[in-house]
Image (cartoon, helix red, strand yellow):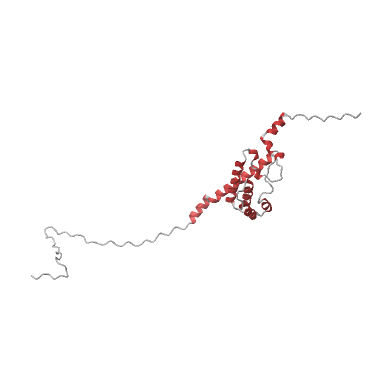
Amino acid sequence: MPAPRPRPARRAPLAPLALLAALSPLAALSPRAALARPVDVTGAREVMRGLYADAVVALEALKAPGPDELYLLGRAYVALGRKAEAARAWREAIRLDEAAHAEPARRWTFVFPPNTQLLAKEKQRLKDGFEAELRDLLAALLEDSAPAPAARALINANAAPAAPAPTEPAAPAPIEPAPTEPAPGEPAPIEPAAPAFPDDEPAPAE
């Protein structure tokens, strides 16, 4: 008579705390559910190799880049010193990512390196680091667009005064003789009468 087969051990029910942890929003950030930037994103290989100019050419040719492509484009712009374009690309990546994912746990995947399983705290660190880098970039743009007070004062002090516009001398006003009045008791001078006939016609004989 064959020996009876042993019954498989029954698994203990999932503890309430473990069940709550599995259903919490942080579960989406667990290593098993890790979401990250895909490996085959356009420009990723060029950025990884430091070929930033080639990455910009490839990424700028895209008609509708997504958050992943815009993040890499901003990264290439930063390496090339094109701060304003980098900030514009990264802000657009954030906007598109927010519009595509209503759940916060599924956002910011464009800053997560591919083929890497990250814990929630590691993803939070990458997100915070990216936001801090973007803030520093925007602050640098503001500083570059407006000179510092000391530099502005130096520019104003070294500015050459503008030459006055040439002015023409005013023509002297005509001097009219002051009217003379007769002294008391003297007759008034007799003004010569205007000619009654034009000069080109002879006066009639008397």
Q: Nearer the viewer, residue 95 or 190?
A: 95
Residue 206 sits above or below residue 40 on the image: below
Along the line of sight, the residue nearer the viewer: 127 or 160: 127
| In this view, 58 is above or below 172 | above
Q: Residue furthest front?
A: 1
Q: Is residue 50 left or right of residue 181?
A: right
Q: Quadrant of the N terminus?
A: top right
Splitting the image into 4 quarters, where does residue 130 fall?
A: top right
Which residue is located at x 68 percent, y 37 percent? 28
Q: Quadrant of residue 195?
A: bottom left
Q: Is residue 52 above or below residue 11?
A: below
Name of the residue lying farthest toward the left: 206
- In-front residue for pair 206/42: 42
Q: Residue at x 69, y 36 (%)?
A: 27
The total of numbered circles placed on residues is 0
The location of residue 189, given as percent across then percent down, is 13, 62
Image position of 185 (left or right of 60): left
Residue 53 in the image: state x and y as whole percent.
Answer: 63, 55
Residue 197 image point, x, y percent = 14, 67
The picture places residue 45, in percent across and down from the top left corner, at 68, 52
The C terminus lies in which quarter of the figure?
A: bottom left
